[in-house]
Image: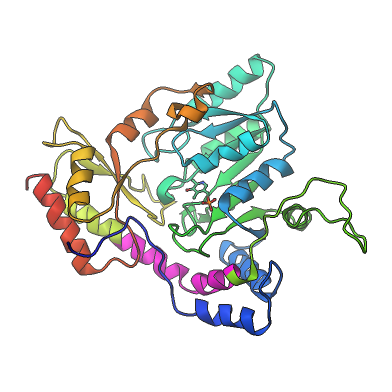
Amino acid sequence: MEEKIWLSSPHMGGSEKKYIEQAFDGNWITSLGPNICGFEEDIQDFLGEGVHVAAVSSGTSALHLALILLGVQAGDEVLCQSLTFVASANPIIYLGAKPIFIDSEEETWNICPIALEEAILDRIKHGKKPKAIIAVSLYGMPYKVNEIQAIASKYDIPLIDDSAEALGSSYKGRKCGTFGDLSIVSFNGNKIITTSGGGALIVKDKAKRDRAVFLSTQSKDDAPHYQHSQLGYNYRLSNVSAGIGRGQMEVLEDRIMQRRENHNFYVEVFKDIPGVSLLTEPNEDYFSNYWLTAILVDPKITNCNRETIRLALLNEGVESRPLWKPLHLQPIFENCKFYGKSIAENLFEHGLCLPSGSNMTMMQKNRIKAILQNVLGV
Ligand SMILES: *Cc1c(COP(=O)(O)O)cnc(C)c1O
């Protein structure tokens, strides 16, 4: 069998080792040190004016902290996009709060403004005003930012911007990771850049950022002994991991370009194949990092379905994956409410994510192309 092609694997730039070595040389093998500050500054510089960044151990912990900073408590309700990775909603459960899931719209596959407003009105009618809205830029594609922000401010509900998959994407020239009252990104191994495991919370004022760091380092009061008057967490990023992050930030622009090239490659592959469409930018307001290229397969037009394609690729050692299974259809969220129709469910049924690593070679892409053309009968 030929070499395995992964959906999205880590892609080091080269200078990561230099920063790790600096960590070793200074014996900063802890969650304190120059790489952490440096990495936070790099992210701040990338995202632009007026943001403050706290580097943490994962995107999930960043979301958990975001909900804590908003004061979400047991019994509260939080609105969350249904078509997303489970980590978008798990932190709601950590706090004993209840996720309420919202359908997608067909243009960006993200949270539907109509279903969102319907849910807010209905929850208010039930005497339960939601405490937050979690919107996700899936596969790098920004959600309908203006519309979602307008609804959030109309009803005065804080917006959490889950940009775990969308570092480097933008909407109307504004960067993903800056749209929420609080935003998060992830540096997990499969994301556009990685620290092997890590994430960041992005906020608009320094006091909030400092509070996030306080919470993420066990909420130590100012005292010579360890004194705690609040519940804390061990969520800070390590200085070694942050070293990887500093090296990765140097190549982020390249990674965005490479992922976008992958997307263009697939656009060419499917150009003349009826029944297969891609998740693409709806208009020039949108700029996607195309973290993953995703397709929809219409089995009535093609001679196959997304599963036939997935298995054909797998058979040749190529990894692909169905879209995220909507969370309202997941066994662990069985008893949660859902607002909308069946857009997310249909996307899940017909959607497939194709190999999108920035380190894919032309030869690997041609292998993928041949398999796709073969299974689709062209
Ligand atoms: C990856 C991801 C997360 C969680 O990030 P981790 O760093 O893996 O904890 C959250 N939301 C979405 C949409 C993700 O894709």
Q: Position of residue 302 (x, y in %)?
A: 13, 37
The residue that appears at 14% across and 53% down in the rendered structure is 371
Q: Main secondary structure of the magenta part?
A: helix
The residue that appears at 58% across and 31% down in the rendered structure is 79
Q: Residue furthest right?
A: 224
Task: Give the image quarter of residue 277.
Answer: top left
Q: Residue furthest bottom?
A: 25
Q: Residue furthest top?
A: 126
Q: Is residue 181 left or right of residue 329?
A: right
Task: Give the image quarter of residue 35.
Answer: bottom right
User: Which residue is at the front of the view, 126 or 13?
Assistant: 13
The residue that appears at 66% across and 73% down in the rendered structure is 29
Q: Position of residue 8 (x, y in %)?
A: 36, 58
Task: Give the image quarter of residue 155.
Answer: top right
Q: Is residue 320 left or right of residue 272?
A: right
User: Which residue is at the front of the view, 70 or 35?
Assistant: 35
Q: Which residues are magenta?
A: 241-261
Q: Is residue 216 left or right of residue 222?
A: left
The residue that appears at 43% across and 27% down in the rendered structure is 329
Residue 72 to residue 190: above or below: above
Viewer can see residue 86? yes
Q: Is residue 249 magenta?
A: yes
Residue 227 to residue 158: above or below: below
Residue 258 to residue 270: above or below: below
Q: Is residue 245 magenta?
A: yes
Q: Is residue 54 left or right of residue 279?
A: right
The image's colour scheme reads rainbow
